[in-house]
């Protein structure tokens, strides 16, 4: 039995990081809420808040156990092993860091919560709230948990999996595949099943409150330091490396998005600045502890340009990803995950727990740092597996709910405003014809 040796400093940092990441979901509610029209803002924010409720309960019951329990077929962990977060002394420490497993479980709960909430932006303005709640429960169980187990819980994409044996260990320090590629691929599947908003491509659907968007981006950026630096599970130099890389990549992405906007549209917008911030945060997430400052700048800049260009693809291909979950999270998630294969490098003295990175200043290296193409191929394979798994399983879930509960509110309710139709309240006085008639 492992001796329990509490590290109070690491534990205090992880409790703080957990709180920071939880704040990201209300921050996302502001970010998404500002981007929709005034008649939809409460519903949009409620989709984020209810994700906290649904996922928080399920994670405590079986989510942690299915993610970090004993491996079953490389896909899930044993759901009974830590059911109800009953954890014995032998499993009381996480990664040998002196952090109690209950604290680690709390930290991981916040990741599951925000991943579900991210998807909601793709289907803004038009879906039944009850169907969303059921979807959240099914998706976290059947998609998020398996992917998280495969990457972080000892499954197929982990350090002892077949990809690691055949090539090298896929690097996902803080959630490029688990959170962002996962949510982005799911968003694409969901919008294809749910269909377009009434008037999509024919009438303007502009953000109703850009200060909300900027506030949400700021809260996300603040919380993201818990997301990335917290994933070290220690208050050490690697956490500091993740912090500075998160900052630098995000700055580069914001600037790259604004420059792209200026050349393409003739103006650099506040929405573009906020979106560039999120794109940079997404891209550096998997790479935060495995690249240097120069790599983080390039990753952020590439993500800023790629996502700025990608958000327009929905009009070209005709899918209605309302708030650009695909264009930002899927695209920048893939950028950050794949570019690790080019820029991975271990800083001298780095002591991250991720295998191969930071072992006496050596370990896994990217192509541009003399490591060859192996890690690049590994990262591409991991990204593809995450995309395919998430898309296919989400498609099946979405079709099943369409055939049973149905996804769409009525056209009249959508035209009048989903806030009043679904929640019986509005964010602003006199928004929507139905509200005016009732009052």
Image: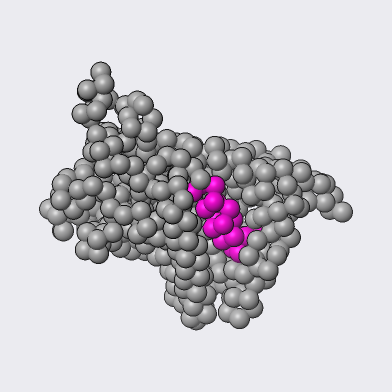
Residue 386 spot, x, y in % from top left: 50, 66
Residue drawn at (47%, 36%) of the image: 49
* Residue beneath the point at 24% across and 61% down: 318
Toward which corner of the image does residue 412 lie, by quadrant? Answer: top left
Magenta span: chief secondary structure: helix
- The magenta segment is 135-153
Q: Position of residue 351 (x, y in %)?
A: 63, 59
Q: Residue at x 69, y 59 (%)?
A: 77
Q: Residue at x 35, y 46 (%)?
A: 408
Confirm whether the magenta stretch covers residue 29: no
Q: Give coordinates of residue 375: x percent, y percent.
A: 52, 75
Q: Is residue 244 visible?
A: no
For this view, does 104 lie left or right of residue 394? right
Looking at the rendering, which quadrant does residue 12 occupy? Answer: top right
Spot the residue most to the front.
404
Image quadrant holding the N terminus, namely bottom right
Residue 43, how many percent across, how many down?
37, 36
Number of numbered tags placed on the structure image: 0
Horizontal relation, residue 416 to residue 136: left or right:
left
Q: 293 above or below 38?
A: below
């Amino acid at each position: 039995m492992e001796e329990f040796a509490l590290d109070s400093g690491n534990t205090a940092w992880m409790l703080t990081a957990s709180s920071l990441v939880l704040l990201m979901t209300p921050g996302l509610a502001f970010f998404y809420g500002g981007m929709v029209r005034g008649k939809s803002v409460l519903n949009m924010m409620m989709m984020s808040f209810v994700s906290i409720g649904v996922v928080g309960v399920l994670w405590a019951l079986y989510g942690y156990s299915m993610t970090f329990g004993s491996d079953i077929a490389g896909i899930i962990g044993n759901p009974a092993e830590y059911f109800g977060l009953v954890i014995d002394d032998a499993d009381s420490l996480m990664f040998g860091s002196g952090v109690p497993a209950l604290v680690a479980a709390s930290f991981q709960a916040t990741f599951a919560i925000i991943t579900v909430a991210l998807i909601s932006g793709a289907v803004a303005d038009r879906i039944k709230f009850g169907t969303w709640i059921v979807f959240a429960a099914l998706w976290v169980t059947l998609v998020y948990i398996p992917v998280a187990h495969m990457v972080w819980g000892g499954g197929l994409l982990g350090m002892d999996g077949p990809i690691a044996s055949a090539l090298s260990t896929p690097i996902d320090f803080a959630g490029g595949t688990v959170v962002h590629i996962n949510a982005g691929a799911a968003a694409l599947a969901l919008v294809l099943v749910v269909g377009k908003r009434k008037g999509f491509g024919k009438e303007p659907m502009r953000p109703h409150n850009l200060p909300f968007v900027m506030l949400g981006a700021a809260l996300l950026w603040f919380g993201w330091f818990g997301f990335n630096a917290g994933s070290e599970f220690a208050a050490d130099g690697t956490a500091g490396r993740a912090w500075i890389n998160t900052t630098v990549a995000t700055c580069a992405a914001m600037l790259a998005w604004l420059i792209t906007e200026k050349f393409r549209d003739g103006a650099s917008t506040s929405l573009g600045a906020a979106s560039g911030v999120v794109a940079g945060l997404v891209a550096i997430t998997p790479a935060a502890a495995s690249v240097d400052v120069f790599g983080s700048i390039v990753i952020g800049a590439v993500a800023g340009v790629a996502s700025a260009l990608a958000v327009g693809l929905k009009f070209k291909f005709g899918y209605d990803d309302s708030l650009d979950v695909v264009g930002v999270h899927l695209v920048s998630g893939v950028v950050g995950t794949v570019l690790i294969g080019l820029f991975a490098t271990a800083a001298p003295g780095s002591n991250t727990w991720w295998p191969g990175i930071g072992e006496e200043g050596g370990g896994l290296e990217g192509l541009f740092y003399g490591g060859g193409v192996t890690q690049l191929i590994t990262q591409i394979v991991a990204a593809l597996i995450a995309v395919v798994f998430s898309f296919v399983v989400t498609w099946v879930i979405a079709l099943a709910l369409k055939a049973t509960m149905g996804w769409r509110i009525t056209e009249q309710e959508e035209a009048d405003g989903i806030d009043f139709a679904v929640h019986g309240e509005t964010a602003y006085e006199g928004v929507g014809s139905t509200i005016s008639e009732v009052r």
